[in-house]
Image: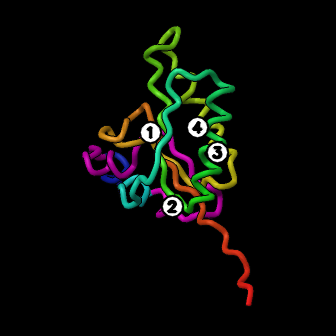
């Protein structure tokens, strides 16, 4: 117990624990986020919001998520950028996108993308499964 609290943090601990921002809908098992973070979901589509203002980005993101749900897409990448081209190099869209995603009922969880998938400039999002319509005979 003492070692786990005060011992050195291994690379595996860093990869598993992750200091990057994440979101997990209340009531879902932590394993859902863990599986997303480990890359167990295949990214099926993506949207790039670089260079958009907040209103354009919000509208485009909402439409993208609606289309993804309509087509049964579960795992998407949202590229918001790192803010390197913004005044003061502040990642305005990064903060906004994460807030918007956390407010959407169809978003189950998200995590920062792995370096090869965009790192700090993107999030990987897991969406809810499409609702089944009643069977008609």
List the residue tagged with mark 3. 102
Q: Residue 10 appears at what percent x and percent y?
A: 25, 47
Q: Earlier in the sequence, mark 2 or mark 1?
A: 1
**CB under 8 Å between discs 3 and 4:** yes
Q: Residue 12 appears at what percent x and percent y?
A: 27, 51
Label 2, label 1: how many angstroms apart (C-alpha)?
15 Å
Q: Earlier in the sequence, mark 4 or mark 2?
A: 2
Label 3, label 4: how many angstroms apart (C-alpha)?
6 Å
* The N terminus: image quadrant: bottom left
List the residue tagged with mark 1. 20
Q: Earlier in the sequence, mark 2 or mark 3?
A: 2
List the residue tagged with mark 2. 30
Label 3, label 1: how many angstroms apart (C-alpha)?
15 Å
In the rendered image, the vertical position of residue 26 relative to residue 116, given as above or below: below
- Horizontal side, residue 2 vs residue 121: left or right: left
Q: Which residues are magenta?
A: 7-33
- Quarter assignment of residue 113: top left
Q: Earlier in the sequence, mark 4 or mark 1?
A: 1
List the residue tagged with mark 4. 98
- Horizontal side, residue 43 vs residue 133: left or right: left
**Dot 2 crowding, Cα within 10 Å, few <14, some 14–19, many 20+:** few
**CB under 8 Å between discs 4 and 2:** no
**CB under 8 Å between discs 3 and 1:** no
């Amino acid at each position: 117990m003492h070692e786990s609290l005060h011992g050195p943090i291994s690379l595996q601990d860093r990869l598993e624990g992750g200091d990057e921002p994440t979101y997990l809908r209340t009531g879902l098992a932590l394993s859902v986020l863990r599986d997303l973070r480990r890359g167990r979901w295949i990214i099926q589509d993506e949207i790039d919001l670089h260079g958009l203002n907040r209103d354009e980005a919000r509208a485009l993101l909402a439409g993208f998520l609606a289309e993804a749900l309509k087509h049964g897409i579960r795992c998407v990448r949202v590229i918001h950028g790192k803010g390197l081209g913004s005044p003061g190099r502040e990642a305005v869209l990064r903060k906004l996108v994460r807030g918007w995603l956390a407010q959407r009922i169809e978003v189950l969880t998200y995590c920062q993308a792995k370096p090869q998938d965009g790192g700090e400039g993107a999030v990987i999002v897991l969406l809810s499964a499409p609702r089944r319509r009643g069977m008609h005979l």
